Amino acid sequence: VQLVESGGGFVQPGGSLRLSCETSGFDFGNYAIGWFRQTPGRAREGLGCFGNRDNSTYYTDSAKGRFVVSSDSAKSTAYLQLNRLKPQDTGVYSCAAIRSFFLCFDLASERLGYVEAYWGQGTQVTVSS
């Protein structure tokens, strides 16, 4: 199983980035993809989930209104569109493949501290002027 994030980089405040999560080695269509970030000095934070079975979406308050999750099952790739970026969005962004949308929701919303998942290595996003 592999999950490889890409698309991170350096962007000015107010800018946008599109992160990709290319996957292989599991049944992509039957998993949810969660997006998380690790910012300096803070614990891992959930951003949202995309359910590949029925295109369900969930966003945490940190992502709602600015970030968009999506997926291309034909490419086994998930995406996280980051808009109107702020300096506090700086961090390492990771994707995770989770067996059910509801477990992804539980992890992203911090109702659960751990669920079984496949994780990528992360991609750095730096927002600065």
Image (cartoon, rainbow, N blue to C red):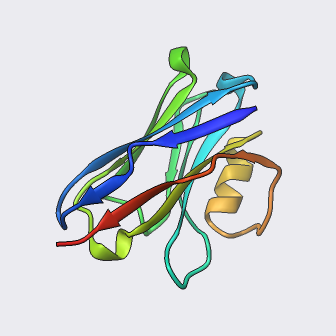
Q: Position of residue 65 (x, y in %)?
A: 31, 58
- Point out the residue furthest to the right here: 116
**Which quadrant would residue 85 be assigned to in this image?**
bottom left
Foreground residue, 86 or 12? 12
Please determine whether, in this image, residue 6 is positioned above or below residue 82: above
Q: Residue at x 38, y 43 (%)?
A: 7
Examine the image and state in which quarter residue 100 appears.
Answer: top right
Quadrant the C terminus occupies? bottom left
x then y, percent, for residue 15: 19, 57
Which one is nearer the viewer's eye here, 74 or 110?
74
In the picture, which quadrant includes the N terminus? top right
Residue 122 drawn at (x, y percent) = 56, 53
- Pick out the residue farthest to the bottom: 41
Q: Residue at x 62, y 30 (%)?
A: 23
The mark tally for this picture is 0
Q: Is residue 45 left or right of residue 105?
A: left
Pick out the residue farthest to the top. 74
Residue at (65% x, 39% y) in the render? 32
Q: Locate residue 71, reporting x and y percent.
A: 48, 30
Q: Is residue 10 left or right of residue 27?
A: left
Is residue 48 placed above or below 38 in the rendered structure? above
What residue is drawn where x is 29% and y is 74%? 87
Query: Residue 126, relative to residue 35: is it above or below?
Result: below
Quadrant of res 29: top right
Looking at the picture, does residue 74 appear above or below residue 120?
A: above
